[in-house]
Image (cartoon, rainbow, N blue to C red):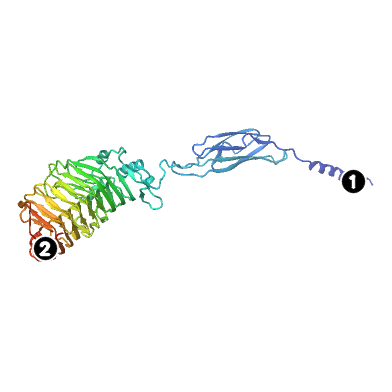
Amino acid sequence: MKKIFKSIVAILCCGALFASCEQEAPEVNMSVDLPSIDVEAQNPESVAVTLTTDANWILTCPDWVTPSATYGSGDSIISFQFASNYKDETTTTRPRTGEIRISGGGSLTGKGAVAVISVNQAGYTYVDPNPSLGGITDAEEFAAFIVAANSGGSLIRWTNEETGEILLLADIDLSNEAIDWQALADATKTSNANNAAGIVENTTPFEGVFNGDNRKITGFNPVVVLGANQTFGLFQVAHNATIKNLELSGTFNVTATDQADAGMLVGTAIHSTISNVKIGGKIVSAGTTASKRFSIGGVCGYAYAGLIGEAEYGKTLFEGCVVNADVEFDGGSNQANGATCAMYGGICGFATTPNAAQDHKVTIKNCVNNGNMNVKIGRCSGILATANTGVILEDVTNNGNQVNTVANGRLGNIVCNVSHHCTLKNCVNNGDLEATNNYSGTVGGIFALAGSATITGIEGGGNYGTIKTLSGAGKYIGLLWANHNNTFPTKNITASGRIIVDGVERTISEANYMENIGYMKDPSCVTNIIWSAPK
């Protein structure tokens, strides 16, 4: 009995002890004074958090949060450093969030507890100080654009994101815009002796696509003096560029002290396309003080296509351009008539390619000049003054009248001088050409002088205008040309119009018109010239 009693007592004692072991452990105190932290994206400041606890603790956090301690016991102050959520001033970053967890207890000393701190870090939103406008919206924006385009500035603000073009969104009047055109001209040095490589290397050309969207730019009234090897226009240099669909007008006043080129739209065009452009207003020049080329064009001063460096080829094209601007141009000290003279062409002043790039042409196509020319310069024409090398004139028309008071000019109302590897096709002149002081010069309805055996040919078109000159010009007067001085093929051209010498009109008919088309070194290369009685 005693043994049984002792066993019962033992069992009861163990049960009491077991019951005592299952009593609930006390709560662990675990709290922080900042349950949430908000920090900046850039250069965030450190934050100190007070932890209140009577337990040992351990801390975990995101990898972009660095605590001053990751474990400890009892009450503590923990500092947190935060990595910058920022790359650079042009990069947008997203906001980010995370949790800092501090846990403790969970042993015989008490029940486990967790304190959670939420961390919210801001992102960085880049705000473009010059946001894209999708195009050019007004005169102020155009003024800012044209300065940037001529000085190598960013054009993103005016670039249409869908087309990649600089798009004109409104008609523009530049009359009240304070643009320092002379400063832009002074910043452009071209190294411009028929050498486009130097032009590209020494300038900041416009190389994009400018689409005028058939809108008007008026009030373009620069007064500029060009120095050695400078070029000037609304766009000073266009390289691998396209400029199209606009009307430009104003009073364009440019003179020079050395070799220079100027065009109302483009000073120098290299491997570029200029299309569907109308030029209006007036072009004025007092010429140059140097015996060097000074070429002005209604659209472009100097055009180039061909080799740049060792391997870069390209073409330059003027297509669908119309010039309505009248011209007053006195050559000043330079009254010569050669390649270094003061010259004007309604579309372009001087165009060339290197001989090594004969297939890479400057082409003037479907262009018209309506502007009248009152000038005193050695070369002047309604389309192109000098077709130097590798130039094509095709389907062009001059309707402008020319009065030229130079004493010894090479004057033709389509082109003055035609040279190596050039082609004329369907060129029509309707304008009158009056040389009032041209005692020893050359005067022709279509061209003045073509003297290279490598000229590809002249075909189609014709002259319908009147030639007025003085008898001193001798044999170099013609309805079609003044001096056809080589053996290139010439055919299918209409001879019409009139010739008036010393105030007396010649009697020209179907019987004698071939005697009046102009001097021919080799008449056998000239075929099928068509007579049309003048109206």
Binning the other alpha carbons within 10 Å of mark 2 as few (below 14), some (14 to 19) or many (20 upward) gives many
Report the Cα–Cα distance between label 1 and label 2: 142 Å
Q: Position of residue 362 (x, y in %)?
A: 23, 56
Counting labels gives 2
Looking at the rendered image, the quarter that the C terminus falls into is bottom left
Of 475 and 270, the residue lying toward us: 475
- Which amino acid is tagged 1? Ile
Of 404 and 342, the residue lying toward us: 404
Q: In what element is the residue under mark 2?
A: loop
Q: Which mark is residue 285?
A: none
Of 140 and 371, the residue lying toward us: 371
The quarter holding residue 229 reads top left
In the rendered view, tell whether residue 315 sits above or below residue 54: below
The quarter holding residue 175 reads top left
Tell me, yes or no, if residue 62 can be seen here: no
Tell me, yes or no, if residue 300 can be seen here: yes
What residue is shown with label 1? 8
In the rendered view, tell whether residue 177 sits above or below residue 135: above
Q: Position of residue 263 (x, y in %)?
A: 23, 47
- Residue at 23% x, 43% y: name it: 252
What residue is shown with label 2? 487
- Which amino acid is tagged 2? Thr
Q: On the rendered structure, is 368 left or right of 18?
A: left
In the rendered view, tell whether residue 2 sits above or below residue 306: above
Binning the other alpha carbons within 10 Å of mark 1 as few (below 14), some (14 to 19) or many (20 upward) gives few
In this view, the mark in front (1 or 2): 2
